[in-house]
Image (cartoon, rainbow, N blue to C red):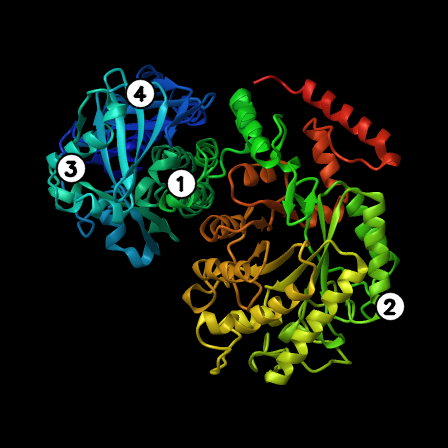
Amino acid sequence: MRIACIGAGPAGLYLAIAMKLRDPAHELEVFERNPRGVTFGWGVVFSDQTLANLLACDPESARRIEAGFAHWDDIEVHFGGEVHRSSGHGFIGIGRRELLEILAERAEELGARLHYEHECDPAGDWSRFDLVVAADGINSRFRAHRAEVFDVAVETRSNKFVWLGTSKLFDAFTFAFERTEVGWIWAHAYCFADDCSTFIVECSEATWRGLGFDRMDQAEAIARCEQIFARYLDGHRLQSNAAHLRGSAAWLNFQRISCGQWRDGRTILIGDAAHSAHFSIGSGTKLALEDAIKLAEVLNRPGLPIEQAIDEYQAERALEVVKLQNSARNSTEWFETLERYTGFEPWQFAYSLLTRSQRISHENLRLRDRGWLGGIEQRFWREAAGEERVAPPMFAPFKLRQMALANRIVVSPMATYSANEGAPDDFHLVHYGARALGGAGLVFTEMTCVSPTARITPGCTGLWNDEQTAAWRRIVDFAHQRSAAKICLQLGHSGAKGSTQVGWEKMDAPLSEGNWPLIGPSDVAWSPANQAPRPMNRADMDMIRDQFVAATVRAIDAGFDMVELHAAHGYLLSAFITPLQNKRTDEYGGSLENRLRFPLEVFAAMRAAWPRERPMSVRISASDWAGEEGVTPDEAVAIARAFADAGADLIDVSAGQTWADAKPTYGRMFQTPFSDKVRNEAQVATMAVGNITEFDQANAILASGRADLVALARPHLIDPAWTLRAAAAQGHRDIAVPPPYLNGMAQLARLFEREAQDQPRL
């Protein structure tokens, strides 16, 4: 094949190497607009896995790259007058210029032709080549030329950064945070050669303007950065290799690039031309090199048509890109919302920083640096319980008013659709009793409805008569007598989502017969198949409020430790809050303040009826997944503050299910960022929920200050003793085990110990 590589960066050069190694008869020409040896940026960072991939593809260039690496194991976080140093991270770095020269020399040795100072016109005549591989970077002209075909999405991030270098040699990957009179500014610094380190300075645009960087030339800006970070530079100077840029142009806003299509005829995108990953996770060069390896592999597979080869290349690499871009997004947003975390103690700030992308977990940190993580756990327990002990955060106690929880794990509210006329029966006794015996600190009931017409389905539980009160009292008494768990009643009203079939029949579909009339803030049906609710008048509001209060009073009689108001998921009170369902023009519609008026009225009335010493929580949907047309995460902060001001002790942070056409972004712990935002911006206790499945995730959420409690739903459906199993797996013995189960717990603990001993040592 005859292939033109546009751009002599890592992607273009390595594709030339990989293609020539597989078949020397290939003709590879690399075109670069800049002179040889001219590059921007300083060092690049690799992982051990990336190096292994290079060794497998071309041992010769990998050997030369490895010889030029600087290696370090530690990360150092400077914040709040303290330095936290964690080891075992295994970074390797090399100068970008040195890397490109190694790759260029190797490509030439293998017979590729390199053309420097060569302008490439995307609209030019490239007919003499079988393929044109656009490796021309994040500002790709080839991608821009056919942006509509490549389905290009460009997201410009909010922070400003400048890529500098220094002769100060850092012996750890260093994060240095400085508070100025106008805001926070920080540096990402790492050594990549025996005479130079990368020194990236980053801050919000407000801080950037407040410090006057928008009005400074490069020399002035560098001098100001030297002044701010003097304590870390030890007299060394900062330097720029972007002398061609004038004034504030040296400062950049990161652009996240993604493309729905990587091929246009004979033109293929690769590396930063196809995608980009934020510098804070250091994976741009990794993606570029691994793109090149995969593309060369499929193009040289015998009998594979070129169209099919390119489809496979995009399918495999796009999946890897999504994974890294998701991690990069998490990392980017952490830095963009830095002030959310600057009130943390330095130990928690450092932990939050290290786990920001979700690529490094709690147990992964234990493998890397057991001693450092032990110190984090000790500080967590000291602040949570006043105890000097090293133990997983999930087992630390937590107190809401006078309710003391034995640990931070919660059985999330989950509909079982198994009640008879609203009354729980033996199934519910076994269901909730088993989960209380299973070790969780707090067990939630399913949404329990305040009247027959408040039910979602005929199988939903209720609390509007004496029979139901007695049935719930039986369940609560069992939990209190046989376990250390507390139990919370979730109260709700279905609104427009009522009168539907049970969950395992046809979700959200109307009953085939026996439907009851629905009410809501407006006459907005849940879907075209559902009946439209009757818009509520003031008399309806009074009735609904009083039904919630009556159920709350019954909850006292039943012995519940806590009550939660369900104001999420599109049910009645949620429907008032979201503009997607609330179309009212009176004092209960329009602004967020108006839309909150009735839900807050209901909550206040419940709070007045509920004992002062017992806590209450509110479940909210922190996003409608509808952009600015629905409830946004920023509005969720205001919603949480409003309920906290009314007396809520905990915000149960969920998301979505407020309109039928929502398209959520699912993934591991996908709702935890909402809990993080609400907790640390509204300054209220939160409970995280949503695709949390592992104790490792729970510990990370708690230690990083993203939530105060962690709720698991589906894992508890299949394993009522999830918390006891997690305790055994982590070697934690200080947990209440029902006496009849002590022998089983002891055996389980021994099995986990034996399994751990059999694991190979890293």
User: Against 603, is 481 above or below?
Assistant: above
Tell me the residue that label 3 is attached to: 221
State how far apart marks 4 and 1 are (Cα). Answer: 24 Å
Tell me the residue that label 2 is attached to: 467
User: Which of the two labelled residues, at mark 4 and mark 2, occupies the earlier sequence position?
Assistant: 4
User: Against 495, is 677 above or below?
Assistant: above
530 left or right, relative to 638: right
The residue drawn where x is 66% and y is 57% is 612
Question: Is disc 3 in contact with disc 1, using a CB cutoff of under 8 Å?
Answer: no
User: Which of the two labelled residues, at mark 4 and mark 3, occupies the earlier sequence position?
Assistant: 4
User: Which of the two labelled residues, at mark 2 and mark 1, occupies the earlier sequence position?
Assistant: 1
Q: Residue 755 lies in what quarter of the image?
A: top right
Q: Secondary structure at mark 1?
A: loop
Q: List x then y, in percent, for residue 615.
A: 65, 54
Tell me the residue that label 4 is attached to: 170
Task: Pick whichever, 323 or 558, lies toward us.
Answer: 558
In this view, the residue farthest toward the front is: 612
**Front position among marks 4 and 2:** 2
State how far apart marks 3 and 1 are (Cα). Answer: 25 Å
- For badge 3, the amino acid type reads Ala
Q: Secondary structure at mark 2?
A: helix
Q: Secondary structure at mark 3?
A: helix
User: Against 108, is 650 above or below?
Assistant: below
> How many C-alpha atoms fall within 10 Å of the one at disc 4: few (<14), some, or many (≥20)?
many
Q: Secondary structure at mark 4?
A: loop
Tell me the residue that label 1 is attached to: 342
